[in-house]
Image (cartoon, grey):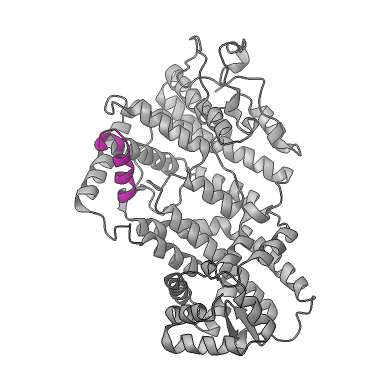
């Protein structure tokens, strides 16, 4: 690396005065350390504006004073203020609207209002209390980041413990005494008196690293989610739900379908979720308990953490975040986690299937292209959208409503036979919920050491329009086909057993959903 290049980079990052101070400090480093720095590729240096944005985020995250740092460590394994600050920087980038455009806001509000009226004829649940919101990307971040942090706290604690173990070993186990300073990027930074305890310093490092990852994940997600229930669970404090106006309108504009139709469909999805979660009071606590059970079982591969730390770019203050990414350092699920995951996926499939069912029933007379929109959403769920990717990176959960098609067919069957009121009454208690075909096989597989190798192959899923007493037509399993294209194991998806033309068992009595 050219010395003039790094000198200029320091000035651009920290200004002429602090930049010169930093350059002087580098000049005084031991020759071996200076040589290591100069041998790095200058193209790997973070952009000055990124460094400045990170410094601003740290300031906004309450890391200005020793007391701030000590309080951050004491408050828990995630610095939520820092995560929020980083997420808001991304949510408010140059591509984002700081306020909802009047025309877009009116279109979204009208769609939400109409959707609630249409749903009155399709389900027995009342509208959720309050008024649905129309949010900016930043508004979505502010409304949901606390919920993400709550779900992620057990994993963040495990990460902090793992970082402590790895760094303690790197220090030879000698955590007694004090540390004089740390090497942060190219600048040796003296530590304030209150933070020279190595144990506190490591906790602060873990706290900060996971907060940075959470902030980036939430910031990225804010550009892609269209409603507050896109992740299948309730994260927003407003029970009536919300649409992110800019994202919803941009999504509508990408499709060769009238914008009003697309917004009406998205609004139906949102308010249907809102009605279900508001009326079924045990539903969200059940999700929280299952996610907590899974998260508390997360274990970390210390060797993988060590490797991530070793490969971290010393010049990039964010590179350590790789050491707290569960897709890189998580240990495969335990049987208890597999059981929790199976229960989560079934419950999520029942939720998404019910919403799919009532959305179609409420919107079929009003949205000409509802079948196309419905199929597009199913495919998004199958391959995993931004919300699913966030669950995976933060919690290590490959959470997919894998059996959404079966669940939708099941709810349609129950509604056709028993009526909408009897269908919705099954949400009165978890024990009343209908079983998806092969539920027992899925539970058995979840308790096995290798749950993903067993799928419920003894029952072919019901087609999306199946009604009891009618002949079921073989259907293309779009979810399984997409999984094949993505290189995934079709055995991971219970939908992968949809019959083809010569399956021979599509009319088996075992295939019928049971209420």
Labels in figure, total:
0
Vertical placement of 45 versus 301: above or below? below
Residue 142 point in image, percent of width and height: 40, 61
Question: Residue 498 lies in what quarter of the image?
Answer: top right
Q: Nearer the viewer, residue 240 or 476?
A: 476
Relative image position of residue 481 (x, y in whole percent) = 54, 28
**Image quadrant where one finds the C terminus:** top right
Q: Nearer the viewer, residue 28 or 98?
A: 28
Q: Nearer the viewer, residue 99 or 1?
A: 1
Q: Is residue 257 magenta?
A: yes
Residue 297 placement, left or right of 434: right
Establish if 207 lies above or below 333: below
Q: Is residue 428 left or right of residue 459?
A: left
Magenta region: 243-262
Magenta stretch, overall SS:
helix
Q: Position of residue 233 (x, y in %)?
A: 48, 45
Tell me what residue is drawn at x 38 percent, y 52 percent.
238
Quarter of the rendering occupied by the N terminus:
bottom right
Q: Residue at x 50, y 19 (%)?
A: 463
Question: Would residue 235 appear left or right of 494 to someone viewing this image?
Answer: left
Q: Is residue 74 magenta?
A: no
Front-lying residue, 45 or 53: 45
Can residue 175 be spotted in the picture? yes
Residue drawn at (44%, 62%), measured in percent from left and top?
Answer: 87
**515 relative to 57, above or below:** above
* Residue 450 point in image, percent of width and height: 74, 37
- Kindly identify the residue that appears in the image at 50 percent across and 30 percent down: 426
Kindly tell me whether residue 197 is visible in this rendering: no
The correct choice, above or below, for 165 with respect to 304 in the image is: below
Q: Is residue 329 left or right of residue 470?
A: right
């Amino acid at each position: 690396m050219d010395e003039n290049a790094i000198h200029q980079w320091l000035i651009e990052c920290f200004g002429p005065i602090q930049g010169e101070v930093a350059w002087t400090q580098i000049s005084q480093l031991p020759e071996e350390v200076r040589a290591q720095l100069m041998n790095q590729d200058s193209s790997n240096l973070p952009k000055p504006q990124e460094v400045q944005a990170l410094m601003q985020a740290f300031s906004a995250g309450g890391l200005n004073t020793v007391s701030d740092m000590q309080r951050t460590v004491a408050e828990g394994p995630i610095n939520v203020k820092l995560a929020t600050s980083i997420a808001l920087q991304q949510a408010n980038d140059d591509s984002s609207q700081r306020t909802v455009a009047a025309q877009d806001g009116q279109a979204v509000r009208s769609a939400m209002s109409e959707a609630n009226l249409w749903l009155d004829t399709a389900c027995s649940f009342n509208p959720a209390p309050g008024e649905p919101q129309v949010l900016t990307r930043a508004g979505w971040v502010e409304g949901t980041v606390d919920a993400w942090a709550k779900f992620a706290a057990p994993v963040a604690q495990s990460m902090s413990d793992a970082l402590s173990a790895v760094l303690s070993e790197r220090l030879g186990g000698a955590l007694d005494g004090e540390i004089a300073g740390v090497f942060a990027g190219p600048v040796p930074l003296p530590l304030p008196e209150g933070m020279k305890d190595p144990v506190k310093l490591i906790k602060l490092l873990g706290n900060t690293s996971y907060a940075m990852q959470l902030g980036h994940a939430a910031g990225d997600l804010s550009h892609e989610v269209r409603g507050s229930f896109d992740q299948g669970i309730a994260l927003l404090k407003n029970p009536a739900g919300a649409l992110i106006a800019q994202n919803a309108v941009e999504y509508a504009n990408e499709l060769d379908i009238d914008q009003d139709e697309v917004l009406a469909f998205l609004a139906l999805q949102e308010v249907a979720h809102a009605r279900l979660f508001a009326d079924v009071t045990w539903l969200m606590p059940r999700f929280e308990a299952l996610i907590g059970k899974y998260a508390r079982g997360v274990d970390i591969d210390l060797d993988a953490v060590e490797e991530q730390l070793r490969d971290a770019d010393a010049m990039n203050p964010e590179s350590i975040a790789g050491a707290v990414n569960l897709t890189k350092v998580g240990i495969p699920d335990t049987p208890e986690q597999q059981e929790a995951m199976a229960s989560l996926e079934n419950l999520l499939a029942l939720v998404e299937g019910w919403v799919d069912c009532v959305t179609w029933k409420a919107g079929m007379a009003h949205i000409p292209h509802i079948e196309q929109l419905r199929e597009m959403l199913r495919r998004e769920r199958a391959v995993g959208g931004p919300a699913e990717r966030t669950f995976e990176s933060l919690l290590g959960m490959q959470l997919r409503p894998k059996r959404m098609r079966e669940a939708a067919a099941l709810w349609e069957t129950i509604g056709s036979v028993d009526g909408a009121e009897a269908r919705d009454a099954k949400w009165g208690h978890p024990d009343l919920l209908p079983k998806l075909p092969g539920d027992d096989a899925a539970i058995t597989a979840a308790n096995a050491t290798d749950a993903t190798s067993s799928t419920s192959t003894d029952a072919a899923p019901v087609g999306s329009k199946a009604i009891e007493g009618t002949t079921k037509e073989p259907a293309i399993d779009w979810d399984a086909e997409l999984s094949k294209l993505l290189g995934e194991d079709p055995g991971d998806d219970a939908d992968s057993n949809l019959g083809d033309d010569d399956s021979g068992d599509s009319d088996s009595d075992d295939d019928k959903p049971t209420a």
